[in-house]
Image (tube, grey):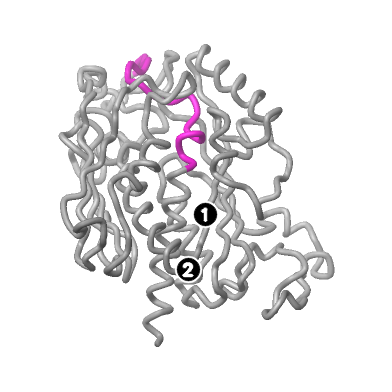
Amino acid sequence: MSSSFGTLFRLTSFGESHGAAVGAIVDGMPPRLQLSADLIQQQLDRRRPGQNKLGTSRNEADAVQILSGVEDGLTLGTPIGLLVANTDQRPRDYGNLQRIPRPSHADYSYQMKYGIQASSGGGRASARETIARVAGGAVAEAFLQQCYGVEIVAWVSAVGTIEAPALDSDSLQRSAVDSSDVRCPDPASAAAMTAEIIAAKAAKDSVGGVISCVCRNLPAGWGEPAFDRLEALLAQAMLSLPATKGFEIGSGFAGARLRGSQHNDLFVAKGNRLGTRTNRSGGVQGGISNGEPLLMRVAFKPTATIGQEQHTADYDGRPALLAAKGRHDACVVPRAVPIVEAMAALVLADLALRQRARG
């Protein structure tokens, strides 16, 4: 199983949804940088279940322990071990899944690949695995902020058919994102999105959405063409997340409908550097950061686990009726905001170290 991500800044995650714990090993964090459990906990608190009426009822504190690599609030340059205990497991909710794979879930594909699967909660396929990513991403973000002043802010820009208007991502802060439970900084859109999620939850159904993300203050020059282009690594990172179905950077698919004369980002002087008048490239040209804000979007499907009865089939192909009993989110995007930020930070931290290695 591929459970490690990155080249010089490397995250390895471990643990299952209803096992004893989920954790991460972060290797490559430079020494003598400030890092505390409280800093990591801030992002884990934004991801954790049971925050409000929109999410799953699973109640986990997701309290992180730093096991190694940090002393007196400073990184040692050695591997950083992070651990989060699972305290609210309910494996009994998943008893019928031993014979019936959940539609659009990973039960069947894991069974076909490994010949065995975790008995409850999806195991490694569960979104609970993303605890490791958020914890490791918070470490990466500490490096990026202290050494480069990089800022990463993600927000919910769509839920179902409800789409928020374009926002000023140059000044958007996480405090504005967190001002609503749905994590959309536009109040009118947030109210409509909240109503949509509550309606889906009441119908024992689910709804998907889109998360937008901006990364500011990136130096020009990060990215490793041809195969480790900045946008290629970001796409890999985002599409490795559970429930993701699409990735765009800059103008994305909409740019395919324009002509070159409409799409080109013309160069202009910006203080003591060269910049672009527009940013349809999304901060990346030729697979390398160009100094403009990095703009991307990630699409998430409706949660596969729903409470409605569904006519499906068991592992022997016999007709079966399945209504999931496990606790789940009617919409994953509000809790996925810090996960997207974390994966962006992991990519950028790795490319920052690779650029440093050039001397």
Rendered location of residue 357, percent (x, y): 37, 82
Residue 164 image label? none
Amino acid on which disc 1 is placed = Ile
Rendered location of residue 250, percent (x, y): 65, 59
In-front residue for pair 321/308: 308
The residue tagged 2 is: 148
In-front residue for pair 179/307: 179
Q: Residue at x 51, y 35 (%)?
A: 333
Q: Residue at x 59, y 75 (%)?
A: 286
Amino acid on which disc 2 is placed = Tyr
Give left or right: position of 207 versus 38.
Answer: right
Q: Residue at x 46, y 63 (%)?
A: 233
Which quadrant of the view contains residue 19? Answer: top left
- Residue closest to the far right: 261
Rendered location of residue 27, percent (x, y): 25, 64
Vertical order, 232 against 213 (above or below): below
